[in-house]
Image (spheres, rainbow, N blue to C red):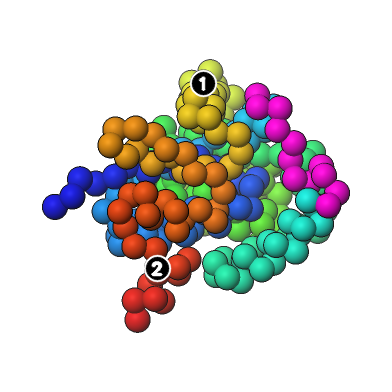
Amino acid sequence: MSTRKVLELFYDVVSPYSWLGFEVLLRYKTIWNVDIHLRPGFLGAIIGATANTPPAMIPKKFTYMMQDLDKVAEFYQVPLRQPSDFFHVILKKGSLSAMRFVTAVQMSHPEFLEQLSRELWLRIWSEDKDITEPESILQAAKKAGIPEDLGKKLLSTISSPEVKNKLRENTDQALGYGIFGMPSIVAHINEKPEMFFGSDRFELLAHRIGEKWLGPVPQRSQL
């Protein structure tokens, strides 16, 4: 039996392409011979540290992205819908408090990490709801199966040095791999990390790890 490959997914729930990459990669967790490690980070810090420019800040890229998201949402079968006030939600509100909460969950209750991340994406990128206010975060936590008391306890820790440092550590680890945007997948191949940026590099990723690409919805391909 071949050695299982480790795939690290660096993501931020403010990024719609991160949601697409997240869902597709997790569909392969029982198909490919891989271990998937979710690495929540802070995209704002990644962009700042690499002097990157968000696509939304470049008019022609923004126009293209808005059209592209509708197409890829249908193709990837992810219920992604654009928020009504994109610039306010994405660029002004951001995701720092949400990603600190995700990090707190990763640290102490990782069994909820996958579903919590999904619920936050659903709120911002499908239901056009807030992800910055405490009550909104708690609603996402409840839908992810986190008991109310535990959710409140975790929320009370998001300003702690431990949680802040962990999110910074995840983000610094991403920067150490050369990551400049999200989503980014780091595949460990022959004990060496290889980075794949974006949600459209799965065919190449599959080739590099010696697996078969069955499309964005592999379960459908296997019918």
The residue drawn where x is 74% and y is 40% is 54
Asked which secondary structure carries label 1, the reply is helix
Q: Amino acid at mark 2?
A: Leu
- The residue tagged 2 is 214
Q: Position of residue 126 (x, y in %)?
A: 66, 62
Q: Position of residue 81 (x, y in %)?
A: 69, 64
Q: Amino acid at mark 1?
A: Asn
Magenta stretch holds residue 22? no
- Most distant residue in the top direction: 161
Q: Observer-nearest residue: 194 or 117?
A: 194
Label 2 vs label 1, nearer the camera: 2
Tell me, for residue 175, which label it has, or none.
Answer: none
Q: Is residue 192 left or right of residue 163?
A: left
Residue 132 falls in which quadrant of the image?
top right
Q: Is residue 3 left or right of residue 146?
A: left
Does residue 123 sit above or below 54 in this rendering?
below
Q: Does any portion of residue 176 appear in the rendered image?
A: yes
Magenta stretch holds residue 54? yes
Magenta highlight range: 49-60
Does residue 119 sit above or below 195 in this rendering?
below
Residue neighbourhood size for the residue with mark 1, other residues' Cα within 10 Å, grouped as few (<14), some (14–19), many (≥20): some
Tell me, for residue 165, which label it has, or none.
Answer: 1
Q: Position of residue 36 (x, y in %)?
A: 36, 46
The residue drawn where x is 42% and y is 38% is 194
Q: Observer-nearest residue: 185 or 127?
A: 185
Q: CA distance from mark 2 to mark 1?
A: 38 Å
Q: Observer-nearest residue: 92 or 157?
A: 92
Q: Is residue 101 left or right of residue 89?
A: left
